[in-house]
Image: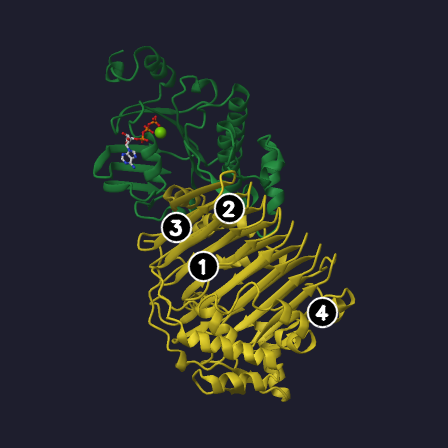
């Protein structure tokens, strides 16, 4: 039994395995030729190729971003491969993929768990489930690649409208080299009967993953969307730079939940994914977008799921737990841009900070001059464990009219020794006690997760704290 | 059962307990009284192994085992239980999800908890509430006794379990405690209290007076001692021997 425990402790990240599978991988480096090659291998429409090249031209002129709260070695974009696709037509490979799916505990071909899933492995979507059932309701759910071919008009109408390629360094890079992703369209008045999800897996050693998700929910529609991600344990850093665009048309609702569990590096800060993600949604009249995120993995995270509250009485919510340990650095938060009258936003950010990690909340609430009688409520709570970690709260608030209300609360607390001792006195050991307290701290947010994720999230905080607390 | 020998305890560079000796046999009830700040809670914390309560001298022996340096959860596992003077709250964790950690058995956890809730006349709706959050003072104390019933300890320290309880709850809690001792014949009890009516609730075999970190009086004449305290307070307690 001792051996077993040791094994678990050594390797807490249970998705750190590598699938040894033959694949076609592009040579390292980024240039026009590579971009054309990506476009060609995907035999995509010409307009998208032009968009890529336009974005690339712009990207080359951009300055490498430097954020105050992140420390890391500069990324060399010519040491990355921008495309890797497994060679599919062999039976052996299929078996390996099925095995991988099993190990990742994905609900593919699982009749009990009703979740439609788009499984993206390195640069390509391998499988999208429940497509037919969804089709009957007029719901489109497929890989981005397929959408480019079959629903070109819809994609063309909306791509880049929420996150333009010029938005930032990584959205621009993504637009140039994105390889695949998920696409979803919910027609007017349709409530999507099951959860839809994307699962991102980085497997190959050298690639960066650049995928896009585009979700459009038409008037009066409803969608709950989940996103999960993992990667093997490696000593080198790998980059993941995604773009997610949500369009919530009149009276519609989108709930987008993420469990980000990329490999985070070891306890000396070696390895792990660099996660640079641009996520943003636009809400028309009476529409509502809720971003829910559990940020647990990655060596480095830079991510601000945001809402443009364009419509009258539109609603934006951001609920986040970020959990950092070892040498992890997370810089996350949201932007709530109020444009419509009587629009409302709520931000609840909880961060849990251990070891030498740095956990920053960065948020912007902007209420436009015309967005009269709007409201924001922001609450940022941080829980520090040990005294080497750093937690920052950086709220930016701009209110341009006089009849809107913005409230901000923020509390930083150290984990209470009294609570731990109390648990100890009841026979509960320190690690378990910390898990209980952290779960309690996060419960406000975890309880809103779709059931499918809820169970996984509860597991996420069962961690080895031995090194974290003296 | 419990044997404390020449104990000195320091917190934050301040010596709180000085040369304390205390012996409690199995199947015994002892009362500990003393003025505010005399070190009663401190003593209960040292016995239960609270970090930062440094033993600079002396020994705590429990059932022939030295427990000075054990981790608090290990001490708990030996069967030592403390009802806290100020029970803590844990936000976000329901009573049920906390309490189930106290039961070793895999099956019937809920049944065990419900059985004990009933004894304490606690509504089972409380299982869904967050641990002690928004509980009244008395409800928190009941929750302490609930955990005692679940854990079935051998040695119990009640740190002011009787402060702030209404008369019915007080009766109920002592009824349950007596019942517990009747069913668990080998268990012992140390009652820390300011309540001079304590003898109306439970029969103890010894009373100790803690004063300035020292036990200055140990007596089996409980009634007489308490009457004296009632009359003269703690300041002249030393003179009690002259009576
Ligand atoms: N963590 C601490 N740091 C500094 N002083 C402390 C600490 N804990 C206790 N003390 C001091 O030790 C002394 C004894 O406190 P303790 O809580 O044991 O008293 P008590 O006898 O239980 O009092 P009461 O009847 O009011 O509950 C007090 O003077 C208190 O201020
Ligand atoms: Mg006390």
Q: Position of residue A140 (x, y in %)?
A: 70, 68
- Say whether marks 4 and 2 touch (CB < 8 Å): no
Q: CA distance from mark 2 to mark 3?
A: 26 Å
Quickly name the residue at label 1.
A463
- Say whether marks 4 and 1 touch (CB < 8 Å): no
Q: CA distance from mark 1 to mark 3?
A: 25 Å
Q: CA distance from mark 4 to mark 1?
A: 34 Å
Q: Earlier in the sequence, mark 1 or mark 3?
A: 3
Q: Judge if badges 4 and 1 mark residues of a common chain.
A: yes
Nearer the observer: mark 1 or 3; the answer is 3
Q: Earlier in the sequence, mark 3 or mark 4?
A: 4
Placement of B213 over or under B222, stated as above or below: below
Q: Judge if badges 1 and 2 mark residues of a common chain.
A: yes
Q: Colour of chain B?
A: green
Quickly name the residue at label 2.
A369
The crowding category of the residue bearing disc 4, from other C-alpha atoms within 10 Å (few below 14, some 14 to 19, many at least 20), is some
Instruction: Supply the letter of whichever chain is yellow.
Output: A
- Say whether marks 1 and 3 touch (CB < 8 Å): no
Q: Secondary structure at mark 2?
A: loop
Q: Judge if badges 1 and 3 mark residues of a common chain.
A: yes
Nearer the observer: mark 4 or 2; the answer is 2
> Which quadrant contains ligand 2?
top left
Q: Earlier in the sequence, mark 4 or mark 2?
A: 4
The crowding category of the residue bearing disc 1, from other C-alpha atoms within 10 Å (few below 14, some 14 to 19, many at least 20), is some
Nearer the observer: mark 2 or 3; the answer is 2
Q: Secondary structure at mark 3?
A: strand
Q: In the rendering, which numbered label is found on residue A431?
A: none
A416 sits left or right of A15 in the view: left
Quickly name the residue at label 4.
A130
């Amino acid at each position: 039994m001792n051996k077993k425990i040791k094994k678990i402790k050594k390797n807490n990240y249970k998705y750190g395995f590598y699938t040894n599978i033959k694949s076609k991988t592009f040579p390292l480096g980024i240039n026009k030729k590579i971009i054309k090659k990506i476009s060609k291998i995907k035999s995509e429409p010409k307009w998208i190729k032009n968009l890529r090249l336009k974005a690339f031209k712009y990207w080359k002129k951009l300055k490498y971003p430097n954020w105050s709260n992140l420390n890391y070695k500069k990324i060399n974009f010519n040491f990355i491969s921008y495309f890797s696709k497994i060679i599919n037509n062999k039976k052996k490979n299929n078996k390996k993929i099925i095995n991988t799916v099993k190990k990742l505990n994905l609900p593919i071909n699982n009749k009990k768990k009703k979740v439609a899933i788009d499984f993206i492995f390195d640069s390509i979507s391998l499988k999208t489930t429940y497509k037919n059932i969804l089709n009957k309701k007029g719901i489109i759910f497929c890989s981005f690649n397929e959408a480019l071919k079959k629903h070109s008009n819809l994609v063309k109408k909306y791509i880049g409208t929420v996150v333009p390629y010029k938005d930032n360094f990584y959205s621009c890079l993504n637009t140039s080299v994105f390889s695949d992703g998920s696409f979803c369209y919910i027609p007017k008045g349709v409530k999507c009967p099951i959860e839809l999800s994307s699962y991102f897996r980085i497997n190959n050693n050298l690639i960066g993953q650049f995928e896009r998700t585009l979700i459009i929910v038409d008037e009066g529609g409803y969608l709950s969307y989940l996103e999960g991600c993992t990667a093997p344990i490696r000593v080198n850093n790998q980059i993941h730079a995604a773009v997610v665009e949500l369009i919530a048309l009149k009276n519609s609702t989108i709930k987008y939940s993420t469990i980000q569990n990329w490999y985070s590096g070891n306890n000396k800060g070696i390895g792990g994914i660099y996660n640079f993600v641009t996520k943003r949604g636009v809400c028309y009249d009476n529409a509502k977008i809720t971003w829910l995120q559990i940020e647990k993995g990655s060596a480095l995270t830079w991510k601000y799921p945001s809402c443009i509250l364009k419509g009258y009485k539109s609603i934006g919510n951001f609920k986040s737990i970020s959990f950092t340990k070892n040498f992890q650095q997370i810089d996350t938060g949201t932007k709530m841009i109020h444009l419509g009258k009587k629009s409302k936003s709520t931000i609840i950010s909880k961060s849990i900070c251990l070891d030498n990690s740095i956990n920053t909340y960065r948020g912007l609430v902007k209420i436009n001059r015309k967005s009269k009688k709007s409201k924001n409520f922001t609450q940022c709570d941080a829980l520090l464990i040990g005294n080497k970690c750093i937690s920052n709260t950086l709220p930016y608030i701009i209110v341009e009219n006089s009849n809107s209300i913005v409230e901000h609360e923020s509390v930083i607390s150290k984990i209470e020794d009294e609570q731990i001792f109390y648990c100890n006195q009841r026979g509960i050991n320190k690690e378990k006690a910390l898990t209980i307290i952290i779960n309690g701290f996060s419960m406000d947010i975890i309880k809103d997760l779709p059931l499918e994720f809820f169970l996984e999230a509860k597991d996420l905080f069962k961690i080895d704290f031995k090194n974290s607390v003296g | 059962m419990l044997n404390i020998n020449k104990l000195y305890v320091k917190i934050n560079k301040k010596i709180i307990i000085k040369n304390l000796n205390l012996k409690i046999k199995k199947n015994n009830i002892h009362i500990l009284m003393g003025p505010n700040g005399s070190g009663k809670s401190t003593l209960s914390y040292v016995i239960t192994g609270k970090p930062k309560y440094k033993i600079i001298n002396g020994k705590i022996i429990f059932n022939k085992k030295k427990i000075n340096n054990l981790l608090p959860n290990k001490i708990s596992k030996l069967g030592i239980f403390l009802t806290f003077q100020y029970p803590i709250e844990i936000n976000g964790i329901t009573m049920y999800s906390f309490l189930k950690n106290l039961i070793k058995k895999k099956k019937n956890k809920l049944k065990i908890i419900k059985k004990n809730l009933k004894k304490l006349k606690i509504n089972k709706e409380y299982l869904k509430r967050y641990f002690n959050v928004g509980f009244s003072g008395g409800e928190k104390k009941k929750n302490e006794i609930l955990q005692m019933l679940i854990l079935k300890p051998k040695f119990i320290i009640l740190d002011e379990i009787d402060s702030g309880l209404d008369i019915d709850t007080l009766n109920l809690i002592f009824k349950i405690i007596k019942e517990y001792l009747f069913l668990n014949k080998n268990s012992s009890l140390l009652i820390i209290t300011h309540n001079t009516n304590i003898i109306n609730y439970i029969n103890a075999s010894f009373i100790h007076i803690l004063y300035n970190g020292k036990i200055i009086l140990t007596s089996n004449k409980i009634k007489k001692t308490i009457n004296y305290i009632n009359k003269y307070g703690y300041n002249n307690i030393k003179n009690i021997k002259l009576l």
